[in-house]
Amino acid sequence: MNSISANLNIMIKASEKASKSLIRDFGEIENLQVSMKGPSDFVTNADKKVEKILIDELSKAKKNYSILSEESGYVKNNDEDNIWIIDPIDGTTNLFHGIPHFSICIALKSYEVITTGLIFDPIKDEMFYAEINNGSYLNNKRIRVSKKKNLNECLFASNGKKYRNVELATRNSGSAALDLAYVASGRFDGFFQENLNIWDIAAGILLIQEAGGIVNKADIKKINDIEVITSNPNINEKMVKILDKF
């Protein structure tokens, strides 16, 4: 096993504990699809339940760290220089419809730098993680961005209005975090999207950078309305040239 920091170990254990609740809840979605009430309230409660487990576990280990979470917002603690950034379920619409493609996301922002990131797909049991200057991994195996050089052979992840008419092969998986993890692991060749939140992208952009990719846009000083453009280095210049037209 590759050497990991204490903070990453905390993140892994927290996400694994939260995933047990999420996997159980996902198993109930199929039954709820045919009920009168539907799964909306159930998914909302699942989101809050996962968040509580994550915050409890992370705070137990690092009680002074501050927290920024999709559901609870910013929770200021004694240490404002170290911030856990949490998305309890990225891909809630997929979960709502019983589609097994969503993730738990945790990142650590330390002195304005994303130093550690984790994206966990509990249904497929895929744990993507990265630490600054220590590489990116999927289930303890080193990952790297793709090596493709021709745009017509590439597949990009994207969603949103800005690039709707771009002449590139795109897919919208319903989870921006997993899209970024897939770029880091070479499954997608690039990603471009606007109007994202910091908890959607914090872990993913570190994964891509540590996997050898280029991140052109991703303002981590913002919380909302963030645009991200990223790809493998071989196609980056050509991709950006096309996107600059929009």
Image: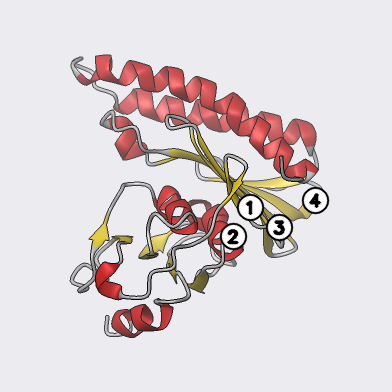
Depth check: give the residue in front, 1 or 115.
1
Q: Marks 1 and 2: in contact by CB < 8 Å?
A: yes
Mark 3 / mark 2, whichever is N-terminal = 3
Alpha-carbon span between mark 2 and mark 1: 7 Å
Q: Which mark is residue 206?
A: 2
Q: Say which amino acid is labelled 2.
A: Leu
Residue bearing mark 1: 130
Residue at figure coordinates x 41%, y 83% from the top left:
237
Q: Secondary structure at mark 4?
A: strand
Quarter holding the C terminus is bottom left
Mark 1 / mark 4, whichever is N-terminal = 4
Please, is residue 240 above or below residue 124 in the view? below
Q: Secondary structure at mark 2?
A: helix
Tell whether 31 sits left or right of 102: left
Depth check: give the residue in front, 199 or 11.
11
Mark 4 / mark 2, whichever is N-terminal = 4
Q: Which mark is residue 134?
A: 3
Badge 3: few (under 14), some or many (20 or more) residues near its Cα, within 10 Å? some
Residue 124 at x, y = what percent?
A: 43, 32
Q: Which mark is residue 79?
A: 4
Tell whether 94 sits left or right of 61: left
Number of numbered tags placed on the structure image: 4
Badge 4: few (under 14), some or many (20 or more) residues near its Cα, within 10 Å? few
Tell whether 233 sits left or right of 240: right
